[in-house]
Image (cartoon, helix red, strand yellow):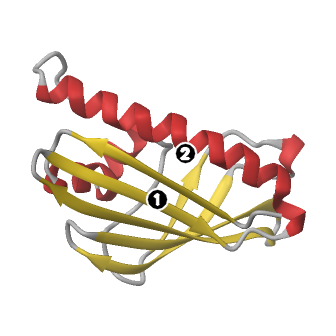
Amino acid sequence: MQTEIKNEWIYEQSPNEVWEYLTQSELIALWLMPNNFEPILGHEFQFTAKPIPSLDLDGIFPCKVLEIVPHQKLVYSWKGGSGNGNISLDTIVEWTLEKLDKGTKLSLKQYGFKDANISIFHAMSGGWSQNVVKMRNILNEKTNGSTNV
């Protein structure tokens, strides 16, 4: 089984602009899900979504900030399960930003999936792609002046 999600996207915005959408709770909520994220090393936070019974997930994803290099790298744990402390998903999410001549290359790596997580792995693979493209669309709208985000 594949145990790692890897993707790259190109943004026309600077790393600083993209970084804001990875580290500001209210901006993360626009493209991913509600959260109480703070860009502080060791900060424990949660992403919340509707329960997903088909994947045995209660919709609460406890996470912890593991590494921060401002405007370059963000790493956090991402866990999930059926509730009551039952954790069946225990992964690491790693974002890296690389400045390009005109914009930013954003890379995502999520690893630590186990065989029992095959359905979650496939759901998250597609989910990341959809959500990160949503973030890019929000940033493009902001850059082109067609939204107040």
Label 2 element class: helix
Which amino acid is tagged 1?
Leu
Residue 16, placed above or below residue 135: below
- Numbered badge on residue 4: none
Of mark 1 and mark 2, the one earlier in the sequence is 1
Residue at image location 12% in from the left, 22% down from the top: 144
Quadrant showing the N terminus: bottom right
- Numbered badge on residue 108: 1
Q: Is the Cβ of the residue at disc 1 closer than 8 Å to that at disc 2?
A: yes
Which amino acid is tagged 2?
Trp
State the image coordinates of residue 143 (x, y, percent, origin top left).
13, 29
Residue at image location 73% in from the left, 67% down from the top: 3
Circle 1 packing at 10 Å, graded few (<14), some (14-19), many (20+), is many
Which one is nearer the viewer's eye here, 21 or 15?
Answer: 15
Residue at image location 59% in from the left, 49% down from the top: 48
Residue at image location 24% in from the left, 62% down from the top: 98
Q: CA distance from mark 1 to mark 2?
A: 9 Å
In the image, farthest residue toward the front: 101
- Residue 81 located left or right of residue 5: right
State the image coordinates of residue 55 (x, y, percent, origin top left).
84, 48
